[in-house]
Image (tube, rainbow, N blue to C red):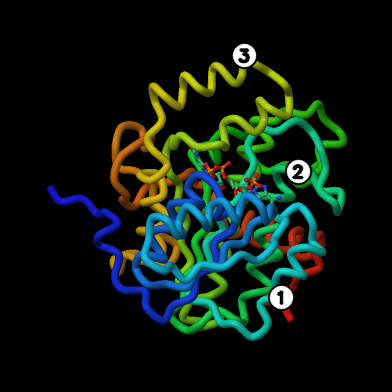
């Protein structure tokens, strides 16, 4: 059986990609492969110095990659708006909503949203809405989700900010990833209803060894959590480059259809080569999708598809 790999990516010459969180982990290997295939890649990162280091590394690995940095902090709607304005009339072929935080201690975004829902979902919801009219015919939007979308009873619309309950940071991560997937299906339905030729797909990397597993441990100053994550990453995790294949497949493989969810085909979807995978029913529920959409519109003030 032949597996889909980076060498199956078609030429992307003349295409422009925006990748959020492009300086680390999957977000490093995604622009790397897109740029190697000829795309111009806009690296949307919150830290100019980290983006600079990633770009130096890419320049040392690839021949004259067309990569550039643009500042984006998804935990600030002002920053998201600034990023969109800064793009000017640039048109986009691939929007990869990759950035994320996992299981961090309770904190809020600049706009008062719970950090994980605010960054992982609302920041990307606003970004996608603001860029939607700049996405070219035939373009694609890829939303990074996770197996963690199953780690929650469901999005609690009555307490999105976790002000009425004891904070459960892993459940909040699950909520944010369920929201990523619910948004992906809803956006796909809306693109089809609006007769827009934009393919919307979801992707997850299985368990990939990246910095994602260490951010919360560092913020919590927990050596035990760091150790557990290090062991998990070494024993179970697959390399970030392999994890990025799901995103790259969703973004470029011609067999992908709008509404597909891509993940690794190996044991428990934790590792392996990309393939179409299933998800929990709730993520596909159009009533929940509609509710998430309208709550996200009122929280962010971004209403592109409803105006
Ligand atoms: N690794 C896995 O096993 C796994 C599994 C399932 C899903 N995922 C998903 O895959 C995506 C990428 O994760 P990764 O594993 O590659 O993690 P990573 O190495 O930690 O990279 C995350 C990226 O997101 C950026 N980011 C975080 N908060 C941001 C904000 N407020 N604004 C802009 N950028 C921000 C980080 O920037 P800084 O470097 O500045 O912090 C970093 O560039 C995430 O959506 C994650 O949920 C990963």
Query: From this viewpoint, is residue 164 visible?
Result: yes
Q: Does the residue labelled 2 lie within 8 Å of ligand 1?
A: no
- Lower sequence index among marks 1 and 2: 1
Distance from disc 2 to disc 3, alpha carbons, whole Å, reads 23 Å
Q: Residue at (74%, 60%) from the top-left corner?
A: 296
Please tell me whether residue 156 is drawn above or below residue 119 in the rendered image. above
Q: Residue at (53%, 23%) from the top-left corner?
A: 229
Q: Where is residue 168 in the image (x, y as percent from the top left)?
A: 72, 28
The label nearer to you, 2 versus 3, is: 3
Distance from disc 1 to disc 2, alpha carbons, whole Å, reads 24 Å
Q: Residue furthest left?
A: 1
Disc 3 packing (10 Å; few <14; some 14–19; many ≥20):
few
Observer-nearest of 259 and 110:
110
Query: From this viewpoint, is residue 94 visible?
Result: no
The residue to which callout 1 is attached is 86
Observer-nearest of 142 and 8:
8
The residue to which callout 3 is attached is 224
Q: Position of residue 93 (x, y in %)?
A: 48, 76
Q: Position of residue 240 (x, y in %)?
A: 42, 42
Q: Residue at (60%, 30%) from the top-left corner?
A: 214
Helix, strand or loop at mark 1: helix
The residue to which callout 2 is attached is 115
- Lower sequence index among marks 2 and 3: 2
Q: Is residue 264 left or right of residue 292?
A: left
Helix, strand or loop at mark 3: helix
Quarter of the image for residue 251 reads: bottom left
Numbered circle sitting on residue 209? none
Q: Is mark 1 within 8 Å of ligand 1?
A: no
- Lower sequence index among marks 3 and 1: 1
Please tell me whether residue 58 is drawn above or below residue 177 in the rendered image. below
């Amino acid at each position: 059986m032949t597996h889909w790999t980076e060498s199956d990516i078609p030429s992307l010459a003349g295409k422009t990609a925006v990748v959020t969180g492009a300086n680390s982990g999957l977000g490093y290997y995604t622009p790397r492969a897109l740029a190697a295939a000829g795309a111009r890649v806009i690296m949307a990162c919150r830290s100019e110095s980290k983006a600079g280091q990633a770009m130096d590394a890419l320049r040392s690995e690839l021949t004259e990659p067309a990569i550039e940095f643009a500042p984006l902090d998804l935990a600030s709607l002002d920053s998201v708006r600034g990023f969109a304005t800064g793009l000017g009339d640039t048109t986009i072929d691939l929007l990869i909503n990759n950035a994320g935080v996992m299981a961090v201690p309770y904190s809020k975004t600049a706009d008062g949203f719970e950090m994980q829902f605010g960054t992982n979902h609302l920041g990307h919801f606003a970004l996608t809405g603001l860029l939607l009219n700049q996405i070219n015919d035939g373009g694609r939007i890829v939303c990074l989700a996770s197996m963690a979308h199953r780690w929650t009873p469901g999005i609690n619309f009555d307490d999105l900010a976790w002000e009425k309950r004891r904070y459960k940071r892993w459940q909040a991560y699950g909520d944010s990833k369920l929201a990523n997937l619910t948004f992906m299906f809803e956006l796909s339905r809306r693109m089809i209803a609006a007769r827009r030729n934009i393919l919307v797909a979801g992707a997850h990397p299985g368990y990939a060894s990246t910095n994602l597993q260490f951010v919360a441990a560092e913020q919590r100053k927990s050596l035990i959590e760091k150790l557990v994550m290090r062991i998990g990453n070494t024993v179970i995790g697959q390399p970030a480059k392999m994890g990025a294949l799901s995103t790259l497949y969703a973004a470029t493989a011609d067999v992908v259809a709008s509404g597909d969810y891509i993940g690794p085909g190996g044991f428990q979807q934790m590792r392996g080569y990309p393939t179409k995978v299933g998800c929990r029913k709730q993520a596909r529920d159009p009533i929940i999708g509609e509710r998430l959409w309208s709550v996200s519109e009122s929280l962010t003030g971004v209403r592109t598809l409803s105006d």
